[in-house]
Amino acid sequence: MVERLLRTLQWGLSSALALLRMRQFSLVRGFVSWALKLAPGLRHARVGEQRGCALVCDILHKRKLPVSLASATDFILGPPTAHPAEYVLADTVSLYCLTEAEAIFVEVPAACDVYAGSRAPSPFLFDTQFELAVRVVRLPLEVMLRLASQVELEASRLIILSNTTRCGSMLLCDMLEAAPRVRVLREPDALTCVLLLQHVSLDAQRAILRGALRMLCKPAAAAARTAAIGRGGDGRGAGGGAPVAGGAPHAIVAIKPRGHCIKLLKLMADAVPGCRHLFLYRDGLLTAQSMARAFCSEPVHLTRHWLLQSPMVRRLFPADAAMAKALIVISDDPLLEWARAEDYFTALPPLAKYALLWAVVCRTYLLARADGLLIAACRLDDLDRDRDRFCREVFEWCGIDAAHAALAARASAHAGDAHQASIFSRSRLAHFRAPTVDSAELRRTLDEICDNCGVPRLGEPTLLPGTLGHPADEAGKSAALAPESALAWHRQGEALQSHSQAQAGGLALRRETS
């Protein structure tokens, strides 16, 4: 009887949802979606007693804000059925997101490939998974970590592509995909979810990150083992050690996280020691202008505004609200206390907001190098100067046969709009004008931000230490501050703290004056 009532409620809400397709009813539609998920949620508690099983649910309805964080609440699910935990190891099942208790996978039809990159419905993996998913698979987090330990992952064949955002990182992904046996994962939100875990210890966060990376790489690992067996072996080296991936299809996996995931850089290095790290950036002013034009446009700006200002929207989309709030938490760096001052970030004009985000990401890269992490940088501006050399140096650093660099150079020369299938397409953003440095006060604010973060000022030549194709002394002269060790940063603590207090006082004075 209860089951029949639940099905009737679910049918009624689904019918109401179908009537609310117009744009102006998007908030009401979100409320109905939120209510609709309650019925399957009641059944999950009943089946959830079978701990250690994978709960597979058909997707009845999907709802998601533009380019928002992947979440278990993106789907309205049907009744769950229990399957062995190994169900998630199938090639058609991929890791979608994480919570503090569960790993959420999505299953796509056998004919679909969420890792198709530029051939996928969206340039972003989280959007492609959302569009193609037909089923959701829920697995307890501890079971996912146990299964992940069985996935073979050779660290030297994993590349982490950190970036500032709006810096040509999608073009770099297209270049890497032009080489054979390279698979690129563009912004998997499982890593973003690790960044947002709050009630988890550092060791647990590192273990979850390691498990997430292994699960994201499982198709390549399976292909490597299959290829090794096909060559007459058992998938293991001569000494019976770990499986080898040489010559296997998709033997190299490059993962490009969202830009703010650079906060996980050290954790990723600890989780998978020996993996390769590459940081992509470009001219600071151009980056900040591009970010302001993209992220202050509709509907992204309205979405973010609703998530931060409306209690109702925060309740309907809790994961997205958490992400929007996390973006304002600039960094845990003790020398950036001034940037974490109450209302400091929200009071900045758009160009200064994104200049701060760019500067903090570049600072994080510099600190990682100072702490001894083996990481190099590549600057998009160099691609236009010498395309062949740029591709060759990137491929050599990433451990990809440099003979394929010519393919990448040709691919980048004829590349179209990498964001054509997203809301960040060139044709769409052409309607929005990029902000300019139009006042002396804005110029002072931008200079203070860059000076405090120890990066080149916006409008000046941007060349960071460790950039491929540039001698160390050349990069050192260009950088506003190129520390040889992390100690060099911390020695400036007292000076920066006093400066931050003066800056906060000046900000308050400007507010009172205005």
Image (cartoon, helix red, strand yellow):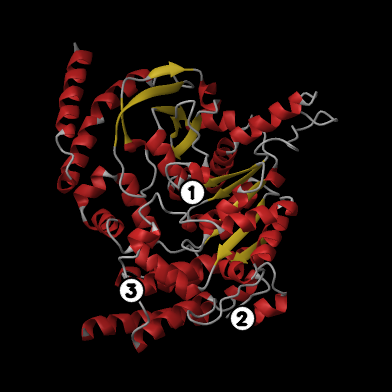
Residue 480 quadrant: bottom right
Where is 199 relative to 151, above or below? below
Q: Is 212 placed left or right of 499 in the picture? A: right
Q: How busy is the neighbourhood of tag 2: few (under 14 within 10 Å), some, or many (20 plus)?
A: some
Q: Residue at x 32, y 80 (%)?
A: 507
Q: Nearer the viewer, residue 427 or 132?
A: 427
C-alpha distance separating marks 2 and 3: 26 Å
- In the picture, the disc for residue 187 is 1
SS assignment at label 2: helix
Question: Does residue 178 sit above or below 453 in this rendering?
Answer: above
Tag count: 3
The residue that mark 3 highlights is 348
Q: Is residue 313 left or right of residue 237?
A: left
Name the amino acid, label 1. Answer: Glu
Bin the neighbour count of mark 3 within 10 Å (Cα to Cα): few under 14, some 14-19, many 20 and up.
some
Residue 394 % position (x, y): 67, 59
Question: Between disc 2 and disc 3, whose residue precedes?
Answer: 3
Cα gap from disc 3 to disc 1, whole angstroms: 27 Å
Residue designated by label 2: 478
